[in-house]
Amino acid sequence: MTSKNEILFQRAQATIPGGVNSPVRAFRSVGGSPRFIERAQGARVWDADGKDYIDYVGSWGPAITGHAHPAIVEAVREAALRGLSFGAPTEAEVEMAELICELMPSIDMVRLVSSGTEATMSAIRLARGFTGRDAIIKFEGCYHGHADSLLVKAGSGLLTFGNPSSGGVPADFAKHTIVLDYNDLGQVEDAFKARGGEIAAVIVEAVAGNMNLIKPLPGFLEGLRELCTKYGAVLIFDEVMTGFRVGAQGVQGLYGITPDLTTLGKVIGGGMPVGAFGGRRDIMNHIAPLGSVYQAGTLSGSPVAVAAGLASLKLVREPGFYDALAVRATQLVDGLSAAARDAGVSFCADSVGGMFGLYFAERVPRSFTEVMASDRDTFNRFFHAMLEAGHYFAPSAFEAGFVSAAHTAADIDATIAAAREVFAQLD
């Protein structure tokens, strides 16, 4: 019997490219038909066939307090009743900016936008305008949104500029992007020695979440900070995923590193489309209308989205919130690792705060190359078996997962028990 999910997917493909509005949703990496979600509550989602799943995608990070948290829903309702959009300043925008600057000590001033892509694109433009330089350094496997100069793969040599990794990106755009290996500080040092006067910024997912979860090696972030300071480049931490996800001050708070600019999203929208970029006052003063670097957006600071974000940020400030979140994530990765070990399956897992990574490999990867060497076929079998059992992980071996404050110890235990049965079948 054809499921409603399959019917919807077939219908969607007639009018939406690939049947989805963001590529990973299409299940191309794992095969099969995506689940069309009808509703969500707490740690669970329900698909078009009425099947429920314990959810470890969490809208790719924003649902840190759980889906449809009453305080966030009520904040959205109250804001919507006052009007959806004004195209003019609101007091809530000021409150949001003040709260972000209070929570993130590296941010003196902040500009609200509508997405993470918009935040990183604008931060890079600002860094170029501030320094008067064109080149940027990024790291292979780190994703910073779909702006042209960021859709770049590594060049053929260590210090060559990148080449476009997407159709529609002119080579002239990509040539200003230097792509290096994540966690290889020596490459960064060589790049600065060779081209230091050209490099406007280094942008990095301080804890990577878009090539699965990859932590920085000791000294890597510290080295980036020292090199940027030495050569007058802007250090940009892309914390769109990790900001207020891994801790109250993001990765920079966990590791004690102060970037020049920070990009944010996900949690600060509470499930609504909000992004932000901010940092040192002298740099932010170059953004229009104060300076010559232009950035604008009709729906920036949308009153409904800001209301959701404020409610979310107030919830995560509650005492013990992040400690409890980390306990749940640790319970999950330790339990899955033990179950795989008992079944003789080559598997490991890692977590930071409320984020986690699953790897069908002998050890936790530390670079894009190591991630690519993991057993994707076995991951795909694991994914589908867990999905069938009612546990919804990201439909890709290259995406981090998320737990929320709504996940209970019983939820995690149920997932581990299901995984134990699945691991036993993976031979």
Image (tube, rainbow, N blue to C red):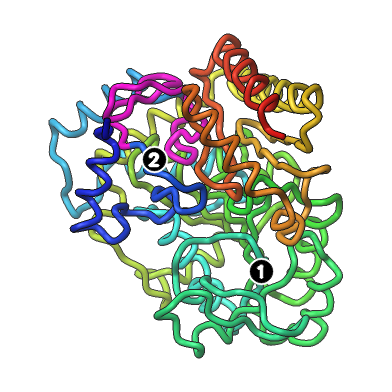
Percent x, y of residue 83 = 13, 39
Tell me which residue sits at (42%, 21%) in the image: 44
Establish if 309 lies above or below 85.
above
Q: Residue pushed farthest bottom?
A: 172
Identify the amino acid type marked 1.
Answer: Val
Q: Is residue 294 above or below residue 302?
A: below
The answer to which of marks 1 and 2 sits earlier in the sequence is 1
The amino acid beneath tag 2 is Gly
**Viewer-closest of 371 and 277:** 371
- Secondary structure type for disc 2: helix
Which segment is the magenta one? 36-65
Look at the image and say whether residue 278 sits in the magenta stretch: no
Quarter of the image where the C terminus is located: top right
Q: Which residue is at a point 63% across and 72% down the rendered structure image?
A: 201
The quadrant of the picture occupied by the N terminus is: top left
Q: Which residue is mark 2?
A: 269
Q: Residues within 10 Å of mark 2 (few under 14, many from 20)?
A: many
Relative depth, front residue between 201 and 344: 344
Q: Secondary structure at mark 1?
A: strand
Residue lying at the far top of the rendered structure: 410
The label shown at residue 218 is none
414, 244: nearer the viewer = 414
Front in this rendered view, residue 141 or 134: 141
Q: Position of residue 412 (x, y in %)?
A: 60, 17
- Asked if residue 64 lies in the magenta stretch, the reply is yes
Percent x, y for residue 193? Answer: 82, 83
Alpha-carbon distance for marks 1 and 2?
25 Å
Q: Which residue is mark 1?
A: 202
Q: Is residue 48 left or right of residue 204?
A: left
